[in-house]
């Protein structure tokens, strides 16, 4: 049995604890991913998908529970320390890149993720050549525009750049937070194809949050359905084959409604 | 009319010397505002702090270079305090700056023990370097100009280094910086600290050229610095880090010549702060005045 790449045990986060507005964002969440697992996270709004990703990335410290990455307990590490293991692509293309800095500088920031940064010159000729090669794979012409501020790129180009920045360092864990949701359908497909190619080629352990049921079925080897801060259903590789969108939505509704009834 | 121009020409070297000294402050205003996206008012207190510390030490017989260094360190501490107050207690950056600036006034008075220390009879970095020629404007221009050149070159290199790039990322997009493993808090504290260190250094050089340290020196220096920065950026632009680092120096040189010109033309010194404030307000309001006229935003235009 191989070691888990990511494991969350009893992850709990309660907002406004002890007040009338108390809300359990994460309620004893358990999940484990093997190396190279491509796990799709689905669930209705408020199910805790974003809290889950934020808890893993360290942006949202847990009230209780443990998180470990590749066997190392990271529960106590804050977000910038966990960045040595984790790369993340956000939903908003504006957040994942630094708009006033150039494409090359953004690539530099990503390359040094989680590594000590020194007083050495940043964008050396060797690095520029490397970034050009990495960006050329996108076929967007970004490799010729290393000195262009990222703010001048379209949303799709920025998101593609974010993706290259995230995967180029081969992180132990890749977090994709509805990263194609803000893009038009054609660009979304382009970014999604690039994502799948990179994840498969580099064998990255990946968590992808999506609202797109077709994506959930088409991609990945595992589906996790969340509700009320817990994992409601886990669909493994075998079971995932042959499942349809309506199957997914059926299971989703029955379970989710049942929970809602129990809760009330 | 000829008289006006003659007196303006006569003042040019002195004004250049003064604007080079204030360049330190303008660089200290630029760094938090433009690089870190941290509107910071600490300069207004760090500038007299540097002056008071340096003046007191020189009057106590300390080597002027050492006095400048101590002033720099004190300024650094002041800036770090502002950033820390903002980060730790979630107090608005401007308010944190005002708090530190206000408290610094008392500290400055305590350091000096009185409101004014004359330094005419003491050695300064200028008398140590240039002897009896220390009071010539050209000598001041060469010495301060060399220092500013060093600082600008160092800043330029730093902002292109690995560490400097990560500091710029903190200002450009804090979420992104954190996700790239950058400690946003540390970078902010060090950056704002460095900015106030620059302002304090400006203050320490200023007292040595004007021959006295005064607790009220530098009143309104922040708005002067902002005005100079805005002018500089209008001239050099902000597209590259080189332009961004040059803007404060260029802006300071132009701004103080403008002021000097206005004063020789007959602008009452009493009206100066109002004029400066009105100018900064106009420059800040200009983009909004334009867009109200139905103009297309530049940003949207260049998107593909």
Image (spheres, rainbow, N blue to C red):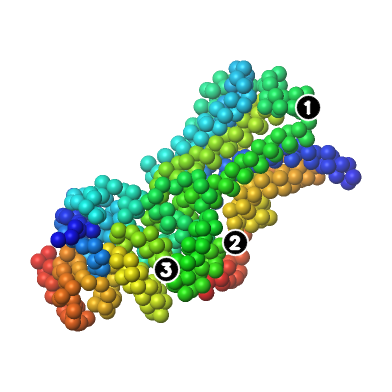
Instruction: Between label 3 and label 2, give the one nearer the viewer.
Output: 3
Left or right relative to B299: residue A227: left
Foreground residue, A196 or A62? Answer: A196
Outermost residue to the front? A126
Q: In this rendering, is residue B12 above or below A145?
A: above
Can you give x and y, in whole percent of width and height, for residue A185 in the image? 38, 79
Q: Which mark is residue A159?
A: 3
Which residue, given by chain and number where applicable, does mark 1 sit on? B133
Q: What residue is shown at x 24% (from left), y 62% (from top)? A: A35
Dot 2 crowding, Cα within 10 Å, few <14, some 14–19, many 20+? few
Dot 1 crowding, Cα within 10 Å, few <14, some 14–19, many 20+? few
Foreground residue, A111 or B267? Answer: A111
**Do callouts 1 and 2 mark residues in contact (Cβ within 8 Å)?**
no
Left or right relative to A206: residue A144: right
Q: On the image, which quarter does residue A167 sit in?
A: bottom left
Can you give x and y, in whole percent of width and height, for residue B38 in the image? 49, 48
Foreground residue, B102 or B227? Answer: B227
Element type at mark 2: helix
Q: What residue is shown at x 18% (from left), y 66% (from top)? A: A227
Can you give x and y, in whole percent of width and height, for residue A66 in the image? 19, 51
Q: What residue is shown at x 46% (from left), y 37% (from top)? A: B80
| Cα–Cα span, label 3 and label 1 | 61 Å
Element type at mark 3: helix
Which residue, given by chain and number where applicable, does mark 2 sit on? B287
Q: What residue is shown at x 62% (from left), y 26% (from top)? A: B65
Subunit of mark 3? A
Q: In this rendering, is residue A53 above or below B147?
A: below
């Amino acid at each position: 049995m191989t070691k888990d790449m990511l494991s969350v045990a009893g992850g709990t986060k309660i907002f406004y604890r002890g007040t009338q507005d108390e809300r359990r964002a994460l309620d004893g969440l358990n999940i484990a991913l093997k190396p190279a697992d491509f796990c799709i996270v689905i669930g209705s709004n408020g199910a805790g998908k974003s809290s889950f990703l934020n808890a893993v990335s360290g942006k949202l410290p847990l009230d209780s529970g443990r998180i470990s990455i590749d066997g190392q307990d990271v529960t106590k590490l804050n977000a910038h320390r966990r960045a040595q293991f984790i790369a993340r692509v956000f939903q908003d293309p504006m957040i994942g890149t630094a708009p006033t800095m150039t494409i090359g500088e953004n690539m530099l920031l990503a390359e040094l993720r989680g590594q000590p940064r020194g007083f050495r010159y940043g964008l050396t000729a060797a690095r520029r050549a490397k970034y050009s090669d990495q960006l050329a794979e996108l076929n967007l012409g970004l490799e010729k525009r290393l000195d262009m501020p990222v703010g001048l790129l379209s949303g799709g180009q920025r998101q593609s750049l974010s993706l290259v920045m995230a995967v180029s360092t081969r992180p132990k864990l890749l977090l994709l937070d509805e990263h194609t949701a803000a893009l038009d359908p054609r660009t979304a497909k382009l970014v999604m194809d690039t994502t799948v190619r990179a994840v498969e080629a580099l064998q990255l352990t990946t968590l992808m949050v999506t609202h797109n049921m077709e994506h959930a079925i088409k991609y990945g080897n595992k589906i996790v359905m969340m509700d009320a801060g817990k994992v409601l259903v886990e669909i493994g590789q075998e079971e995932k084959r042959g499942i349809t969108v309506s199957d997914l939505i059926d299971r989703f509704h029955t379970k989710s409604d049942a929970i809602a009834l129990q809760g009330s | 009319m000829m008289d006006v121009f003659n007196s303006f020409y006569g003042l040019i070297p002195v004004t250049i010397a003064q604007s080079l000294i204030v360049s330190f402050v303008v660089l200290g205003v630029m760094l938090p505002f433009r690089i870190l996206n941290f509107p910071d008012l600490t300069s207004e207190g760090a500038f007299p702090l540097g002056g008071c510390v340096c003046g007191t030490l020189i009057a106590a017989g300390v080597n002027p270079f050492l006095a400048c260094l101590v002033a720099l360190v004190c300024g650094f501490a002041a800036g770090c305090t502002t950033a820390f107050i903002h980060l730790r207690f979630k107090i608005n950056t401007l308010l944190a700056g005002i708090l530190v600036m206000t408290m610094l006034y008392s500290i400055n008075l305590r350091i000096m023990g009185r409101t004014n220390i004359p330094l005419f009879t003491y050695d300064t970095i200028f008398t140590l370097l240039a002897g009896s020629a220390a009071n010539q404007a050209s000598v001041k221009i060469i010495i301060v100009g060399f220092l500013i050149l060093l600082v600008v070159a160092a800043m330029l290199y730093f902002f292109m280094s690995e560490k400097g790039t990560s500091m710029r990322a903190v200002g450009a997009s804090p979420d992104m910086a954190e996700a790239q493993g950058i400690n946003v808090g540390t970078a902010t504290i060090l950056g704002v600290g460095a900015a106030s260190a620059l302002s304090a250094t400006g203050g320490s050089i200023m007292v040595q050229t004007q021959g006295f340290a005064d607790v009220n020196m530098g009143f309104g220096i922040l708005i002067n610095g902002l005005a100079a920065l805005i002018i500089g950026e209008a001239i050099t632009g902000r597209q590259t880090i080189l332009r961004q680092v040059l803007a404060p120096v260029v802006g300071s040189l132009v701004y103080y010549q403008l002021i000097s010109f206005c004063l020789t033309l007959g602008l009452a010194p009493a009206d100066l702060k109002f004029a400066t404030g009105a100018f900064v307000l106009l420059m800040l309001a200009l983009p909004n005045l334009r867009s109200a006229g139905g103009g297309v935003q530049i940003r949207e235009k260049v998107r593909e």
